[in-house]
């Protein structure tokens, strides 16, 4: 009986280092994967930062907004701190489509946009743009 217990003890002591080495190897692979994911995340953050600088050019956006306002005389412009408000009480649907497509297709930071139908061919427009 003592020899059987002794055999079990040696088997257990032999399996313990093998199990420890196996777990250590799997954790080493996990650390390697995490490092590669971290480097990929850093590269993506750098790309996003460069895109942010490119698309958040306020001078270009201001000139685009001035062009939209110049093309549509129905738009009234009010400035409230860092927010620009565009309103129109009676704008044609064709002009409304033109204004909204230009605002959505450019990189304006639209805080709020409301469009209400007045009749078959006219609508009310309210847009807040944050700088």
Image (cartoon, grey):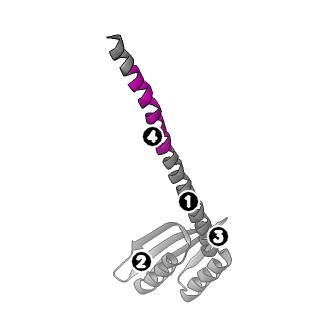
The image quadrant that residue 42 belongs to is: bottom right
Residue contact at pointers 4 and 3, CB within 8 angstroms: no
Q: CA distance from mark 3 to mark 2?
A: 22 Å
Confirm whether the magenta stretch covers residue 22.
yes
Task: First in sequence, mark 3 or 1: give its number.
Answer: 1
Judging from the image, what secondary structure is the residue with disc 2 in? Answer: strand
Q: Which residue is mark 1?
A: 41
Task: First in sequence, mark 4 or 1: give its number.
Answer: 4
The x and y percentages for residue 77 are 60, 76
Q: Residue at x 43, y 29 (%)?
A: 14
**Residue 79 tag number:** 3
Residue range (magenta): 9-27
Judging from the image, what secondary structure is the residue with disc 3 in? Answer: strand
Q: Is 38 situated above or below 112?
A: above
The x and y percentages for residue 97 are 43, 82
Q: CA distance from mark 4 to mark 1?
A: 29 Å
Q: Which residue is mark 4?
A: 22
Q: Is 84 situated above or below 25?
A: below
Judging from the image, what secondary structure is the residue with disc 4 in? Answer: helix
Q: Which residue is mark 2?
A: 123
The x and y percentages for residue 117 are 38, 74
Task: First in sequence, mark 2 or 4: give its number.
Answer: 4
Q: Is 20 situated above or below 101?
A: above
């Amino acid at each position: 009986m003592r020899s059987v217990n002794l055999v079990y003890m040696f088997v257990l002591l032999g399996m313990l280092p093998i199990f420890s080495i196996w777990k250590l190897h799997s954790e080493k692979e996990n650390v390697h994967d995490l490092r590669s994911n971290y480097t990929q995340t850093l590269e993506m953050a750098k790309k996003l930062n460069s895109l942010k600088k490119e698309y958040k050019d306020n001078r270009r956006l201001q000139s685009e907004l001035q062009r939209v306002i110049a093309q549509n005389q129905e738009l009234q412009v009010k400035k409230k701190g860092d927010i620009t408000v565009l309103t129109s009480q009676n704008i044609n649907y064709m002009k409304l489509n033109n204004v909204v497509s230009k605002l959505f297709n450019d990189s304006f930071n639209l805080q709020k946009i409301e469009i209400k139908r007045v009749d078959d061919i006219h609508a009310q427009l309210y847009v807040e743009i944050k700088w």
